[in-house]
Image: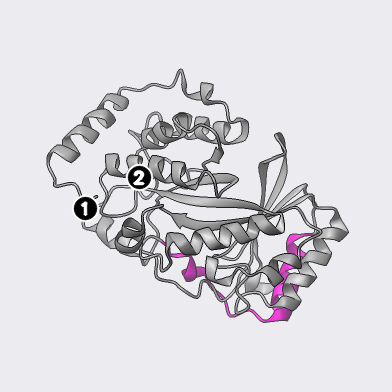
Amino acid sequence: MGSIKPAVWKEKERLNGRIVDGLTVILRTRGCRWDGCHMCGYTNEAYPATEEDLIRQIDFALSDGAEVVKIFTSGSFFDDAELTEKVRIYLLDKLKEIGVKKLIVESRPEFIDRDKLETFKDVNLEVGIGLESASDEIRELCINKGFTFEDFREAAEMIKEVGFRVKCYLLLKPPFLSESEAINDALRSIEVVKGLADVISLNLTNVQKGTLVEKLWNARIYRPPWLWSAVEVLKNVKGIEIMCDPVAAGKARGPHNCGKCDSTVAGAIRNFSLTQDSGVFENLDCTCREKWKKSLELEDFSRIPLF
């Protein structure tokens, strides 16, 4: 397959309350058509794949089975410029052939329509949408997402009407928010989307190449979120399933604490995502936790709140 192999790995997933084997696949496509979000550098991995290229990628990726399969494109699964109808139908047939029980995909709301959804009526489908924040102001000014909360609402309602699950991605600590503003925005957003989403994925901002976030980070005016901030959000969520995979945890470009406790805290976050048991956070502690608390206090004391 040369240089266009998809990224493929196995990890544990939740399925109807059980922990099962999951397969994550990132297909190499032309990438996100919007390509304007301040924190996203995924289009650096874009590739002008043809239909035949994508079919070969699917064959390669699905050579091993799993109960849950996640198909990501670093863009939108339902964007015909990334995956044509022919490719999506080929993928659907392949999933049926290997007996997959649940398919998870992602899409911006503007590419979601009833006809495309109904193609997958025989599959247990979950569609993720990167809302990032329930605040239109934060989403526009801090993230440059390019759609409104109403766009998300309409897409989510359509997905649920067809009988599928909605996953809502929320972003912890977009640029220009203080740590406490970011925590509060995440908690507010969770409450707002509860009636629209079946599951929430809390994404912790990491510093990706070629992004505005990287420029701010290089200028030392942006720090990725503390892992303690993710714990604070997760342990206060009630009434909806929420998960979090702290990508690049413990690294300078990723969510981190002091360095000593990063692995332990990130492990607890991943464990919580599988079990939904907030008890995993009860015995977590480190000397840096007090520094985190003090940083929340001092950061807001020394600046004018944005939102």
- The three-letter amino acid code for the residue at tag 2 is Asp
- The three-letter amino acid code for the residue at tag 1 is Ile
Residue 50 is one of the magenta-drawn residues: yes
Question: What residue lies at 38% left-to-right and 60% top-to-bottom?
Answer: 39
State the residue position of label 1.
Answer: 221
Report the predominant secondary structure element of the magenta stretch. helix
Between 29 and 260, the one lying in front of the other is 29
State the residue position of label 2.
Answer: 185
First to last magenta residue range: 40-62
**Neighbour tally class for label 2: few under 14, some 14-19, many 20 plus, Cα within 10 Å:** many
What separation in Å lies between label 2 and label 1 (alpha carbons)? 20 Å
From this view, report whether residue 45 is shown above or below residue 243.
below
Question: What residue lies at 48% left-to-right and 70% top-to-bottom?
Answer: 43
From this view, report whether residue 26 is shown above or below residue 81.
above
Question: Which part of the image, by quadrant, shows the N terminus?
Answer: bottom right
Question: What residue lies at 85% left-to-right and 53% top-to-bottom?
Answer: 99
Image position, residue 250 (x, y; %):
41, 40
Q: Specify the label residue 130 is tagged with.
A: none
Look at discs 2 and 1 and give the one toward the viewer.
2
Image position, residue 214 (x, y; %):
32, 60
Residue 25 seen by the camera: no
Residue 213 seen by the camera: yes
Left or right for 172, reference 62: left
Between 106 and 11, the one lying in front of the other is 106
Question: What residue lies at 44% left-to-right and 59% top-to-bottom?
Answer: 149
Image position, residue 238 (x, y; %):
51, 31
